[in-house]
Image: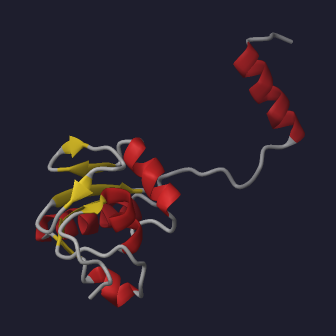
Amino acid sequence: MSGFQGERLRLDKWLWAARFFKTRSLAKAAIEGGKVHLGGQRVKVSREIAVGDTLQIRQGWDEKTVVVQGLSDQRRGAPEAQALYLETAESLQRREAAAAARKAAGGMIERPLGRPTKKQRRQIHRFKTGEDD
């Protein structure tokens, strides 16, 4: 499946090869930011993983729990990358339920229509600095 022959591989390199992150530096930032856990524990970027390890990965709104099925130090196509891990059934159900809840609440979340106007920026600045008119 890959050009990698070892039994262990750096976590940041595996996350990149499995296409969870577009670059290794983004994978590194996610690990350092506490968005990746191995067996429920925060890990360092250089932590080596092996087949059978369980990872919890948070990306945006989603949190995935995956079991490492294979190791690769090369980034390949999506079908080959998906063969490197298996997402647990509980994780899939949790993500689908969270997505449905977000979709249902979509009309209730008020989002700004665009950038603030000059008047609104002045009001924001006055509010933050505590200045009165």
Image spot of residue 101 (x, y percent)? 32, 60
Nearest to the observer: residue 60 or residue 77: 77
User: Which residue sits at x=39%, y=68%?
Assistant: 20
Residue placed at 84% from the left, 43% from the top?
117
Q: Is residue 68 above or below residue 123?
A: below
**What is the x, y in percent for residue 36?**
31, 51
Quadrant of residue 121 within the rendered picture: top right
Asked whether, in this view, residue 64 is left or right of residue 93, the answer is right
Q: Is residue 109 visible?
A: yes
The residue that appears at 41% across and 84% down in the rendered structure is 76
Location of residue 111 with respect to 99 vertically, above or below: above
Colouring scheme applied when the structure was drawn? secondary structure
Residue toward you, 44 or 94: 44
For the N terminus, the quadrant is bottom left
* Number of marks drawn: 0
Q: x, y (%) of residue 58?
A: 34, 55
Residue furthest out toward the front: 5
Residue 5 placement (x, y as % from top left): 24, 77
Residue nearest the observer in this picture, 116 or 72: 72
Give the left or right position of residue 133, taking residue 84 as reference: right
Q: Residue at x 47, y 48 (%)?
A: 29
Residue 19 in sight here = no
Q: Quadrant of the C terminus?
A: top right
